[in-house]
Amino acid sequence: MFTYIKESIDELRNNVTLPSREESSNLMVIVAVFSIIFALATWGVDSLFGKLIQLYFNNIIN
C-alpha cells in the first residue's frame, strides 16, 4: 500500500503537467457550455415524459 502511494506521488511529480491558464480557461468554457446543453436536454426530456404520463393518466381516468 505504501509503495503504491509513493509511486503515485512520484508519478504526479515527474509525469503530470498542468495546462496553461489560457488552455484551462478554454476548457472551462467548453465544459460549462456542454453542461448547460446537457441540462437543457435533460429538462426537455423530463418535461416531455411528464406531459406524456399526465396525458396517459388523464385518458385512463376520463
Image (spheres, grey):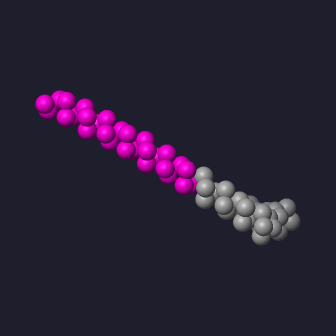
Looking at the image, residue 50 sits to the left or right of residue 5; the answer is: left
Instruction: Estimate the x, y position of residue 1 in percent, counting from the top left.
Output: 70, 61
**In this view, 16 is above or below 50:** below
* Residue placed furthest toward the left: 62
Total marks shown come to 0
Instruction: Estimate the x, y position of residue 59 in percent, counting from the top left.
Output: 19, 30
Q: Quadrant of the C terminus?
A: top left
Quarter location, residue 44: top left
Looking at the image, residue 41 sits to the left or right of residue 18; the answer is: left
Name which residue lies at 50% across and 52% down: 39
**In this view, 49 is above or below 15:** above
Name which residue lies at 19% across and 34% down: 58
Instruction: Estimate the x, y position of residue 16 in percent, counting from the top left.
Output: 81, 63
**In this view, 42 is above or below 29:** above
Looking at the image, residue 2 sits to the left or right of residue 40; the answer is: right
Instruction: Estimate the x, y position of residue 19 in percent, counting from the top left.
Output: 79, 64
**In this view, 49 is above or below 27:** above
Q: Is residue 42 magenta?
A: yes
Q: Is residue 5 visible?
A: no
Q: Is residue 56 visible?
A: yes
Name which residue lies at 77% across and 70% down: 21
Quarter location, residue 51: top left
Magenta span of residues:
35-62
Q: Main secondary structure of the magenta part?
A: helix
Q: Is residue 46 magenta?
A: yes
Name which residue lies at 78% across and 63% down: 23
